[in-house]
Each structure stands twice: as C-alpha cells, then as structure tokens.
Image: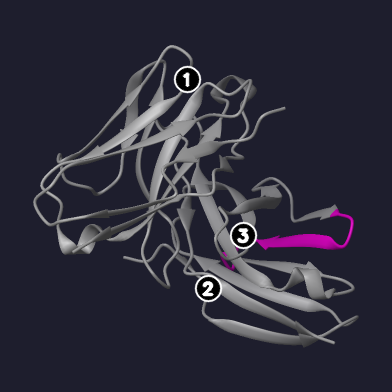
Amino acid sequence: ETGVTQSPTHLIKTRGQQVTLRCSSQSGHNTVSWYQQALGQGPQFIFQYYREEENGRGNFPPRFSGLQFPNYSSELNVNALELDDSALYLCASSSIAGATYEQYFGPGTRLTVT
Amino acid sequence: DQQVKQNSPSLSVQEGRISILNCDYTNSMFDYFLWYKKYPAEGPTFLISISSIKDKNEDGRFTVFLNKSAKHLSLHIVPSQPGDSAVYFCAASPYLIQGAQKLVFGQGTRLTINP
C-alpha cells in the first residue's frame, strides 16, 4: 500500500510569486484535504476535494485554489504570495465512502516566502 | 476562535510511567475525535480515535477517554517509551454529513520521555 506523497519537499519563493504544490493520495482513497501548519501551531484546514470538486473550504482567501485529478492526486496553488504564507503545507487523503474520519498525511512541503 | 485547545505546550515523563495528554473543545457539533503524533520533518501520523457515542477506546499502550459533558478528552500512554517523544495533536471533526470531512486541530503538546 502506497502512502501519501508530496512534492517538492522544500520551496523558496519571493513575495508576489505563484506556487504549485503536489500530492498523491494513498491508494484506495478518493478524497484529498490540504492544511497549512504555521510554526508552533496545529494544522489549519484549507480545503478538501472529492470527485474532482471542492467539497468544503476553511478561512482562506480565493488566492488559495486547488485541483483534484481523476487518479485522485491533487494540486494546491497559491497566487500573489505573502510573507505570512510561509508554512508547512500538508496534504491528507481519506475515503468518504468508508464513512470514517481518519485522514492520512503526507510529509508536507515547507514553503518559505521572502 | 480556538475550538480545540491543548493547554499544555509541553510535557516531560519518565520512561515506563504514564503519559497523559489533555484536550478541550468548545464546539458541541464535533462528533469524532482523533489523536495524531508528529515527528520533526514528517507529517502527522494517525494514532487513535474515538466516536462521540463512546467514552473510551483502547489500542495497545494507547487509550483515549472522552467526557462529552465536560467537552474534554485525554490520551493515556502506558508505559511511556523513548520513541513516544514527539508532538501530539488532538483533532476533532463535525458530523460527516455536514459537508467536508474537516479536521480541527489543537496547537499540539510536545511530549518528552526521559530515560
């Protein structure tokens, strides 16, 4: 069974630029969620994708957007980067059909905005 | 508005003793609760969960207790081992039928097991 993978591991961007982060879900899972974890805080829910559509969103502005592909992999796009976007971005996969709440996380992408 | 709170940023326990990590929540719509463990440079790892219809769930050395009236849950680790040293996050989720399968996390507690 393949776990959740994310790429890249680390990324440095300049304020105002755009970034794309990628995630491959665990086999058998059809739902992908994205979280932002600032230093010293718990992960915060950005949004979730199910059947290639956004299935719920947290308190993040529209410049945070995403995609889910037919193979259930996903992308997180952030436009007009701000210094406060520096954080660890976590992807988690789960299965709504399984009617369970457990989400399984990837190792994360560390984004630094300068 | 912090709906899930872990009021102890850190906890130090001697190897072999019991570790007790606490978590409080404010939203009565939370239906399911989970604990995750996180090592540096890794994503959170699912540890154990509990549904709101139960008050206790055990898995090996790990037991989670839920007190719905107090909106409080705790994770007990017995006996504590050096490999348990990590940051522990409490998370909660509302009813699945209410849209996204969203997890709301606490700030985390850093557990250190001393030999």
Q: Position of residue B39 (x, y in %)?
A: 62, 64
Q: Mark 3 falls on what kind of element?
A: loop
Sequence-earlier tag: 3 or 2? 2
| Left or right: A31 in relation to A103 | left
Task: Say if A35 sits above or below B4 in the image.
Answer: above
Q: Which amino acid does label 2 sit on?
A: Gln
| Left or right: A26 in relation to B100 | right
Residue B8 can be seen, yes or no: no
Callout in the foreground (1, 3): 1
Quarter residue A19 falls in: top left
Q: What residue type is labelled 1?
A: Tyr
Q: Is residue B67 magenta?
A: yes
Question: Which residue has dot 1 on it?
Answer: A72
Quadrant of the drawing holding the C terminus of chain B: bottom right
Distance from Cα at disc 1 to Cα at disc 3 = 36 Å
Q: Mark 2 falls on what kind of element?
A: loop
Distance from Cα at disc 3 to Cα at disc 2 = 16 Å
In the image, B95 versus A26, the foreground residue is A26
Callout in the foreground (3, 2): 2
| Left or right: B56 in relation to A91 | right
Residue B6 circle label: 2
Quarter residue B70 falls in: bottom right
Quadrant of the drawing holding the N terminus of chain B: bottom left
Q: Is residue B12 magenta?
A: no
- In the image, the segment drawn in magenta is B59-71
Q: Mark 1 falls on what kind of element?
A: loop
Question: Which residue has dot 3 on it?
Answer: B68
